Image: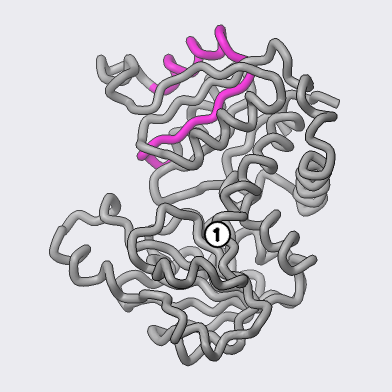
Amino acid sequence: MKNLIDIRDLSTEEIRQLIEKANDIIAHPETYREKCRYKKLATLFFEPSTRTRLSFEAAMYELGGQVIGFSEAASSSAAKGESVADTVRTVSCYADIIAMRHPKEGAPLVASMAATVPVINAGDGGHNHPTQTLTDLLTIVREKGRLDNLTVGFCGDLKFGRTVHSLIAALSRYDNVKFVLVSPEELKLPSYIKKEILQAKHMQYVQTTDLESVIPELDILYMTRVQRERFFNEEDYLRLKDSYILTPDKLAGAKKDMAILHPLPRVNEISTTVDSDPRAVYFKQVLNGKFIRMALILKLLEVE
C-alpha cells in the first residue's frame, strides 16, 4: 500500500495489523520514539482542522520525525492559482510523506497520482476521511473488543458526514453488523451509499428520525454535528442544527456498556453533562487518533 485515499484501500487484514501496531505503541511508546528520525511529514491543509492536523503533527513528532506544511489554502500558492498536482509534486521534493485535507472531493486522489511520496487523505469534502475511520475502529476495538456482532447507531448529519460514510464502508466488511440510521429526512444517508454498500452487501439496516426509540439496542452510538460549512442555505442549517441533542435523560434506556463516539468538533449535539458518563469515549477517541496515525505513518514509510 503506497497511499491511503479511501478506507477501502485497506484490507481487513491490514486494518487488523494497524490496530495491533497502534495498541503496541500505546503499550510501549518508548520503543517508537526514534523510528522516524530524519523523516519529514508535510501537512497540506486546504481546509480548517484542529484535531486531524495536530494529531498528524503529534504522531510524527512522537516518532522522532519533523513536520512542515500549511494550515489554510490562503497561506499556500493555491491562493495564486497553483494546481493540487503541482503543489504535491513540489512538496514531494521536501517531505517523505504527505497528509492532505481539501474541500474538493477527489483532490487527495489527484494528489496521490502526482506525488512521488505516500499521500494520506486527511478528509476531502463530504466524501472520505479514512484516518478518522481508523481512529473509530481502534476505539471500537479498545472499548468493545471486536468489530463484528455489533449494532451501530449513526445520529445526526448522515448526508454530508464523511466520517459516517467511511465508517459504514469499513464496518460493512465485518460479520453480523447492523446499522441504525437516525437523522432528519433532509440529512438521510445518501442513496448511493445505501445502494453500493448496504444493499449490495445485504447489510441489516433501519432508518428512523427518532433516537430514543432505538437507543436501547445500540452497542455503539456515533453522534455527528450538523455541519454549517456543507450547507448552501443558512436557513436550512439553522432549522436542522439542533435536531438531536444527547442528554443524560436520553441515555437512561441505553445499554450500560454502550460506547458513545463523536468525530468532533462538537457544537451542542452532545450535552457537556454527558462527558462524565463512562460510556462517553469521544475524548479517548481523540487520543486513539494519534496512535493509529503513528501506526499508519510507520506502515506507509515501511519503517520496521
Q: Residue furthest left?
A: 235
Q: Nearer the viewer, residue 211 or 6?
A: 211
- Which amino acid lies under the numbered mark 1 shown in the image of this protein? Tyr
Q: Quadrant of the C terminus?
A: top right
Against 289, is 226 above or below? Answer: below
Q: Is residue 158 visible?
A: yes
Give the magenta part as a residue range.
84-105
Q: Where on the picture, by quarter, is residue 144?
A: bottom right
- Near mark 1 (Cα within 10 A), the count class, few <14, some 14-19 or many ≥20, is many
Against 12, is 63 above or below? Answer: above
Q: Residue at x 52, y 88 (%)?
A: 252
Against 211, is 267 above or below? Answer: above
Q: Nearer the viewer, residue 260 or 177?
A: 260
Q: Residue at x 79, y 66 (%)?
A: 145
Q: Residue at x 58, y 89 (%)?
A: 216
Magenta residue check for 164: no
Residue for badge 1: 282
Number of labelled discs? 1
Q: Nearer the viewer, residue 276 or 27?
A: 276
Q: Residue at x 69, y 75 (%)?
A: 177
Q: Where on the picture, by quarter, is residue 119?
A: top right
- Please provide percent x and percent y for residue 150: 70, 76
Q: Quadrant of the N terminus?
A: top right
- Please provide percent x and percent y for residue 166: 55, 55
- Please provide percent x and percent y for residue 75: 31, 19
Q: Is residue 203 visible?
A: no
Secondary structure, mark 1, is: helix
- Please provide percent x and percent y for residue 8: 65, 50
Q: How is the image coloured?
A: one colour
Q: Is residue 217 left or right of residue 302?
A: left
